[in-house]
Amino acid sequence: MIEYKIAVSLVILVYASYLDIKSREVDDKPWVVFSLIGVSFMVYEFMISGTVSDWFLVLFSIGITAPLAFILYYMGFYGGADAKALVTISFILPVYKSPIYLHTFAPLTVLTNATVLVLALPAYFLLRNSLSIIKGNSIFSGFEDEPWWKKVVVVFLGYRLRNVKEDDFYLSLEKTVDGKRRFDLTLLKDEDEFLHGKDIWGTPGIPLLLFMTGGFVAMLLFGDFVAIFLDILISALI
């Protein structure tokens, strides 16, 4: 049964990631359909065994994932589709013992793994901006009045775009104040307002579902990134 749950989880995550990359919108129907499939798995387990395996952990996983997922959504950390993805996974694969784990709540491991993968983006932004400077590009032209610390921070958040269309899904990292260009380092942005124009500092609107899919695969192959980090840290200290 676990193999089917993993396969179904991968199908919905890959499909939703494709839609997220293409249009940044995912219809509610896939989440409803696949959540019902998850419930069907639990009903089937109950029918053949008289109980759902680890039923307490299953109910706890669903009970903790749903409110956490939507709290993070209402706080603006990600979009509604990302919250629905976590809830759907909690119905399909609520518990899973990965190779290395702190807990067996699969949707929470997917979330933390995805977060770790997202945190790799600043390294990419820094590399891209460093190469641009090495090539002789004046990436801070027009921002001479900005303090040095903002310039340091912004190279980790995005890069200068020469020409961007609204359907390229970039968010602005600058604003105009008293006729001067200023960096806007607001971390939580409204992804309904993608920028367009030329020569603008921006950051990609992150298709978090893609990172969740990566976090799910990483859970299967390696385990919980947080547990792995703690294991390495403890081993280094001992």
Image: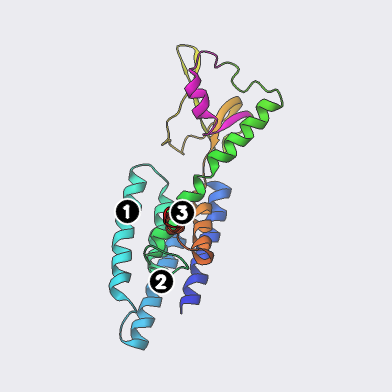
User: What residue sits 39% from the left and 43% below the top?
Assistant: 77
- 151 falls in the magenta region: yes
Checking the image for residue 135, the label placed there is none
Asked whether the viewer can see residue 135, the reply is yes
Amino acid type at circle 3 is Ala
The number of numbered discs placed on residues in the rendered structure image is 3
User: What residue sits 54% from the left and 42% below the top?
Assistant: 121
Checking the image for residue 68, the label placed there is 1
Name the N-terminal-most of marks 1 and 3.
1
Find disc 2 in the rendering and name its residue. 38
Amino acid type at circle 2 is Gly
Q: Position of residue 220 (x, y in %)?
A: 51, 66
User: What residue sits 42% from the left and 53% below the top?
Assistant: 237
Amino acid type at circle 1 is Leu
Q: Position of residue 210 (x, y in %)?
A: 53, 53
30 w.r.t. 137: above or below:
below
Within-10-Å neighbours for mark 2: few <14, some 14–19, many 20+? many
Farthest residue in the front direction?
Answer: 238
Range covered by the magenta-colored residues: 143-161
Q: Nearer the viewer, mark 1 or mark 3?
A: 3
Q: Nearer the viewer, mark 3 or mark 2?
A: 3
Q: Nearer the viewer, mark 1 or mark 2?
A: 1
Q: How is the image coloured?
A: rainbow
Q: Quadrant of the C terminus?
A: bottom left
Q: CA distance from mark 1 to mark 2?
A: 19 Å
Find disc 3 in the rendering and name its residue. 236
Q: Nearer the viewer, residue 198 or 120?
A: 120
- Image quadrant in which you'd find residue 31: bottom left
Element under label 3?
A: helix
Q: CA distance from mark 3 to mark 2?
A: 41 Å
